[in-house]
Amino acid sequence: MGSENEPLSSQKRLSCTTCFDALWFCYSPVHQMQQYYRLGVLDNCSAKWSALVDCLILKTKKSSEMQEILETREKDKAHIWTFRTPEEASSHWKELFGHLDEME
C-alpha cells in the first residue's frame, strides 16, 4: 500500500467523497438560498465541480506521484496565521489597541 522507504502513517489518503458531498450540497436549496442572501447571486457550483474532477484525476496517478503533488500543494498554501517578531507584534498591538491605554 505504501512505499517501503516511507511509513504508512505519513502518506496522505485522498478521498473524493468530501468533494462529492460538497458538490451535492452546493445544489441544495439551503446552500443556494444562503448564496443568494449573502451575495445576491446563485452559486453555479463550478468550483465544486473542478475540485471533484481534480480529485478524480489525482486518483488515476501513481501513489508516489500523487503524494508529491499533495505535498507541493500543502507547501504552497498560505498559512492562516501571520507570524511576527515580538517587536512587530508589539507595534501592531499598539496600533490596534493603543487608544485603550489612553482612556485610563
Image (cartoon, rainbow, N blue to C red):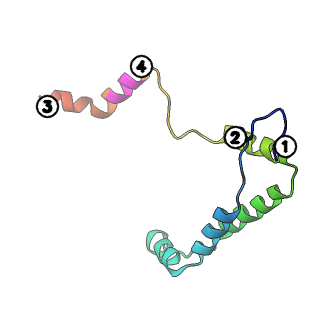
Q: Quadrant of the C terminus?
A: top left
Q: Quadrant of residue 100?
A: top left
Q: Earlier in the sequence, mark 1 or mark 4?
A: 1
Q: Position of residue 57 (x, y in %)?
A: 82, 59
Whether pointer 1 and pointer 4 mark residues with C-beta atoms closer than 8 Å, the reply is no
State the separation of the CA atoms marked 4 and 2: 36 Å
Q: Amino acid at mark 2?
A: Ser
Q: In the structure shown, which secondary structural element does the residue marked by tag 2 occupy?
A: helix
On residue 9, the disc is 2
Q: Earlier in the sequence, mark 2 or mark 1?
A: 2
Q: In the structure shown, which secondary structural element does the residue marked by tag 4 occupy?
A: helix
State the separation of the CA atoms marked 2 and 3: 54 Å
Q: Quadrant of residue 94?
A: top left
96 in magenta: no
**In this picture, which residue range is highlighted in magenta?**
89-93
Location of mark 3 (residue): 103
State the separation of the CA atoms marked 4 and 3: 24 Å
On residue 41, the disc is none
Q: Amino acid at mark 3?
A: Met
Within 10 Å of disc 2 (Cα), the crowding (few <14, some 14-19, many 20+) is: few
Q: Amino acid at mark 1?
A: Ser
Location of mark 1 (residue): 64
